[in-house]
Image (spheres, grey):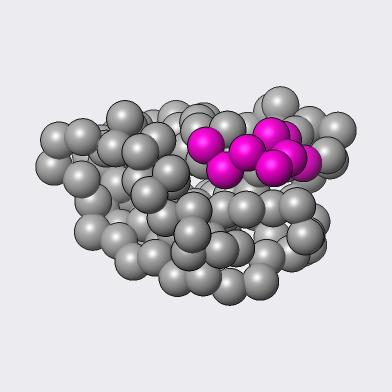
Amino acid sequence: MSVTPLNPAGLAAPLAPYSVGVKAGNTIYVSGVLPLDTDGKTFGAGDVRKQTRFVIETIQKILHEGGGTLQDIAFNTVILKDMADYASVNEVYREFFSESPPARYCIAAKLVREDFLVEIASIAHVSPA
């Protein structure tokens, strides 16, 4: 099985040695996406709704690069800096995953930068090319 890195143009460079996504067979693995703009600055600092929307839209771009869509996601991992933001994140999340939402879990943890409020990683299964 071939493994193809997915690093769409227009995204910030990863903060560590990893691909933002990889396609292995018919599965796309999206690394934990952070609210990082193309200049390496935090997008939507202090606003968890803006950061959540940005993160999901970035996941959408990575999936598109591998031939997938948000509807192909089978599993999401949501990491919050503060569980007090849980309802706000779900409000935005529901806009993208309203019907047949993927399985997921959500935890609170310290993120890479103090101003990051949310991180989401995904696993998607796409149709064979």
Q: Nearer the viewer, residue 31 or 116?
A: 116
Residue lying at the far top in this picture: please name it.
Answer: 10
> At 63% from the left edge and 33% from the top edge, which residue is drawn?
8
Left or right: where 41 falls relative to 126? right
Where residue 46 sits in the image (x, y, percent)?
69, 42
- Out of 18 and 70, give the one closest to the viewer: 70
- Where is residue 83? Give x, y as percent: 48, 64
Give the quadrant of the N terminus.
bottom left
Q: Can the viewer see residue 27 in this picture?
A: no
Reply yes or no: does residue 109 show up in magenta: no
Q: State the image quarter where residue 9 is shown.
A: top right
Q: Residue at x 43, y 44 (%)?
A: 88
Q: In this picture, is 84 found above or below 61?
A: below
Image quadrant in which the C terminus is located: top left
Q: Is residue 127 left or right of residue 47?
A: left
Q: Residue furthest front?
A: 84
Q: Does the magenta segment cover residue 45?
A: yes
- Helix, strand or loop for the magenta stretch, by majority: loop
> Where is 64 relative to 113, above or below?
above
Q: Quadrant of residue 104?
A: bottom left
Q: Is residue 8 left or right of residue 41?
A: left
Relative to 63, residue 31 above or below: below
Which residue is rendered at x = 23% and y = 51% of the image?
102
Image coordinates for residue 119, horizontal then vertical, percent:
56, 55
In the rendered picture of this protein, how many numbered marks are placed on residues?
Answer: 0
Residue 72, horizontal then vertical, whole percent = 27, 41
Q: Does residue 10 appear anywhere in the picture? A: yes
Q: Residue at x 42, y 55 (%)?
A: 86
Magenta extent: 42-49
- 38 relative to 15, above or below: above
